Image (cartoon, rainbow, N blue to C red):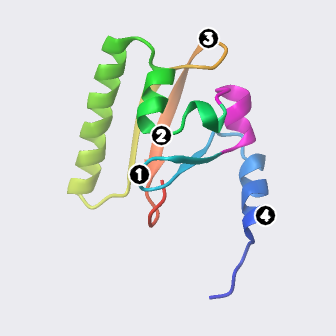
């Protein structure tokens, strides 16, 4: 198949999107964050290396983190059970500057990437 967009153009395009985006591999290791992610949430890749680190950073309250992780796993499993590759949940996120914002967190699986 003809390559429609090269890797550099792909990431440049993601940087034009105003929605925060994280790209991760199948092991949930963070591979890329777009400019909107950095400006709205503020964590560089080094601070959110994988999903566990993400949960610890954005949900510093242990009880809330446990609740969010449990609800997230239920949504992922429910999606899998009906053959879906997408799940979402609205949750409060602690940003790098210490402020809290509400986000509709979405996960879509495409091949070995999320």
Q: Which residue is mark 4?
A: 9
Element type at mark 2: loop
Q: Position of residue 57 (x, y in %)?
A: 50, 22
Q: Quadrant of residue 94?
A: top right
Q: Residue furthest bottom?
A: 1
Tell me the distance, in whole angstroms, between the alpha carbons under discs 2 and 3.
Answer: 20 Å
Frontmost residue, 107 versus 63: 63
Tell me the distance, in whole angstroms, between the alpha carbons under discs 4 and 1.
Answer: 25 Å
Q: Quadrant of residue 111?
A: bottom left
Q: Which residue is mark 1?
A: 27
> In the image, is 5 to the left or to the right of 102?
right
Residue at left 29%, top 21%?
Answer: 67
> In the image, is 8 to the left or to the right of 62?
right
Asked whether residue 100 is drawn in magenta, I would say no
Answer with mark 3 or mark 1, whichever residue precedes in sequence: 1
Q: Position of residue 76 (x, y in %)?
A: 30, 45
């Amino acid at each position: 198949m003809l390559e429609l967009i090269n890797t550099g153009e792909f990431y440049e395009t993601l940087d034009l999107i105003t929605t925060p985006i994280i790209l991760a591999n199948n092991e949930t290791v963070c591979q890329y964050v777009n400019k909107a992610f950095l400006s709205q949430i503020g964590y560089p890749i080094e601070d959110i290396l994988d999903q566990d680190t993400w949960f610890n950073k954005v949900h510093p309250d242990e009880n809330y983190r446990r609740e969010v992780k449990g609800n997230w796993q239920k949504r992922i499993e429910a999606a899998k059970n009906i053959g879906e590759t997408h799940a979402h949940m609205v949750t409060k996120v602690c940003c790098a500057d210490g402020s809290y914002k509400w986000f509709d967190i979405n996960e879509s699986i495409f091949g070995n990437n999320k």
